[in-house]
């Protein structure tokens, strides 16, 4: 089950028409408001500006726009109560310029005398045509009854999509500590294009200055950090070549990363994890990465597109706990299984039955410790990868579930999807690489829906 809905201010704008039953439109509005409260949705109304809180004319539309703008809504819900004044829908949607959803309750049978209180479905066909004409992107929620699962599911998907889209509308900021790793050509990006097309700023953080601050913090906060190192010995099996001094510096790096992000108002960080950072702190800073990843999207190995992927996932999920994983090898016995593996997983993702260890790196052997090793907990997961090239950007999204598989090192989970060969071919032939953001829960639908409100980003659904 997915966690609570994102905290957005939803502008509720009921739409009626001078024909059909105004009384029934009011009744539908009241039923909807009760349902939204039961679902825990934060919303505001146009009651103070429009008679009965239901738009039925051009004049009402102007009043509703002023009211909603004053309340600074994050998303708009255009609800058809009896039929719908189509030009008012277009005027309001165009003026508000926020993620917009359209829905109306399923119509009941005609009255015994043959009359109908409303033609909601018909009105939405007309209104959505106007939205298309005016170039207003929108999500459509199935014409269903309030108590049907389709309503809650559609609203959940829309609100999560709106949270993702608003990240770009207000400007996504990524603090990049260090530079791109020389031999990782797969992480080359077009920074200017990200700024021009997606309102995404990459804020450079000088690695030398960062290390000086982290070391100064380690000296200043030594007593507090040393106590935390002792606690790490209780949480993990600490193995050579890991040293207490290396762990202390690891924690100082964590705190410095969080401070840099706060100071720069960054939504995510990307870090040149090796080798300068490792050598200067006498340890792999993957513990720091995991601790930061529990609170803030983290792009390992200076993967800017990976950081964007994790930031989008975090918004959809309503949590900061994301993991930029490597898609590595296929399951030895399950044709639809694959290994998700990397360092720096959020500690909240550790399997409850796995104590874990802090040791060396099994690939890049050497004198440096502090590398976390543990299996990830079980559950449903969503994977996402924002990537592009040659002026075309895509977001690949898919879902799976953890499965049993062989033991390995670092942070890992074996995951089964519906059709791995299709995933493999799509990712291989697209603009994507082996890194993908991972979060627990099912958010592929919301992420794909978010692309409606992010110009120039195409969704790619992985089966």
Image (spheres, helix red, strand yellow):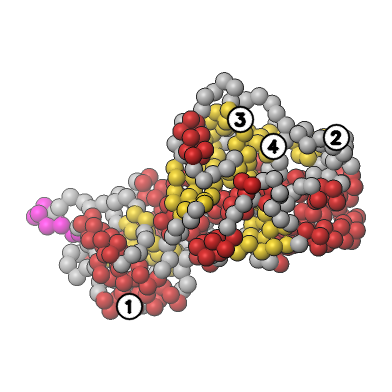
Choose the circle earlier in sequence order: 4 or 2: 2
Q: Is residue 361 magenta?
A: no
Residue 411 circle label: 4
Residue at mark 2: 239
Question: Which residue appears at 50% of the width and 63% of the height?
Answer: 197
Q: Quadrant of residue 409?
A: top right
Visible in this render: residue 76?
yes
Label 1 SS: helix
In the picture, the quarter occupied by the C terminus is: top left
Question: Which residue appears at 66% of the width and 41% of the height?
Answer: 349
- Label 2 environment density (alpha carbons within 10 Å; few <14, some 14–19, many ≥20): some
Residue at mark 3: 329
How far is mark 1 from mark 3, CA to CA?
A: 57 Å
Residue in the foreground of this view, choosing between 289 and 111: 289
Return the x and y of residue 223 as percentages of the image width and height: 91, 55
Residue 194 circle label: none
Magenta residues span 112-118
Choose the circle earlier in sequence order: 1 or 3: 1
Residue at mark 1: 62
Residue in the foreground of this view, choosing between 255 and 24: 255
Question: Which residue appears at 62% of the width and 25% of the height?
Answer: 405
């Amino acid at each position: 089950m997915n966690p609570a809905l994102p905290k957005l201010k939803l502008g509720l704008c009921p739409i009626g028409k001078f024909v059909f039953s105004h009384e029934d439109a009011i009744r539908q509005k009241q039923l909807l408001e009760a349902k939204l409260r039961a679902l825990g949705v934060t919303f505001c109304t146009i009651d103070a500006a429009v008679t009965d809180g239901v738009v039925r004319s051009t004049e009402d539309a102007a009043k509703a726009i002023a009211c909603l703008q004053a309340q600074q809504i994050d998303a708009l819900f255009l609800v058809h109560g009896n039929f719908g004044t189509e030009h008012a829908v277009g005027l309001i949607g165009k003026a508000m310029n926020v993620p917009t959803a359209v829905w109306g309750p399923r119509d009941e049978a005609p009255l015994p005398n043959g009359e109908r209180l409303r033609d909601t479905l018909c009105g939405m066909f007309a209104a959505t045509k106007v939205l298309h004409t005016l170039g207003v992107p929108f999500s459509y929620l199935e014409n269903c009854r309030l108590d049907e699962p389709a309503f809650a599911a559609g609203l959940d998907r829309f609100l999560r999509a709106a949270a993702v889209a608003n990240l770009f509308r207000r400007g996504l900021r990524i603090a990049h500590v260090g530079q791109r790793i020389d031999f990782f050509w797969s992480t080359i990006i077009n920074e200017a294009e990200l700024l021009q097309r997606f309102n995404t700023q990459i804020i450079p953080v000088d690695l030398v200055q960062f290390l000086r601050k982290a070391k100064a913090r380690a000296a200043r906060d030594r007593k507090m950090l040393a106590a935390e190192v002792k606690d790490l010995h209780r949480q993990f099996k600490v193995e050579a070549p890991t040293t207490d001094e290396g762990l202390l510096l690891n924690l100082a790096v964590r705190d410095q990363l969080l401070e840099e992000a706060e100071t720069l108002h960054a939504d995510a960080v990307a870090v040149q994890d090796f080798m300068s950072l490792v050598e200067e702190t006498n340890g792999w800073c993957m513990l720091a990465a995991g601790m930061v990843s529990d609170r803030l999207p983290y792009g390992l190995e200076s993967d800017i597109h990976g950081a964007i992927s994790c930031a989008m996932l975090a918004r959809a999920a309503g949590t900061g706990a994301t993991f930029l994983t490597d898609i590595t090898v296929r399951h030895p016995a399950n044709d639809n299984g694959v290994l998700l593996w990397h360092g720096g997983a959020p500690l909240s993702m550790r399997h409850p039955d796995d104590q874990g260890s802090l040791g060396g790196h099994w690939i890049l052997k050497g004198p440096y410790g502090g590398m976390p090793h543990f299996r990830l907990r079980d559950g449903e997961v969503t994977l996402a990868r924002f990537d592009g090239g040659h002026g075309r950007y895509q977001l690949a999204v898919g879902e799976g579930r953890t499965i049993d598989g062989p033991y390995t090192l670092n942070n890992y989970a074996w995951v089964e999807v519906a059709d791995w060969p299709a995933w493999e071919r799509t990712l291989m032939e697209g603009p994507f690489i082996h890194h993908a953001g991972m979060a627990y829960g099912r958010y592929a639908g919301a992420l794909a829906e978010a692309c409606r409100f992010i110009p120039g980003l195409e969704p790619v659904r992985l089966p």
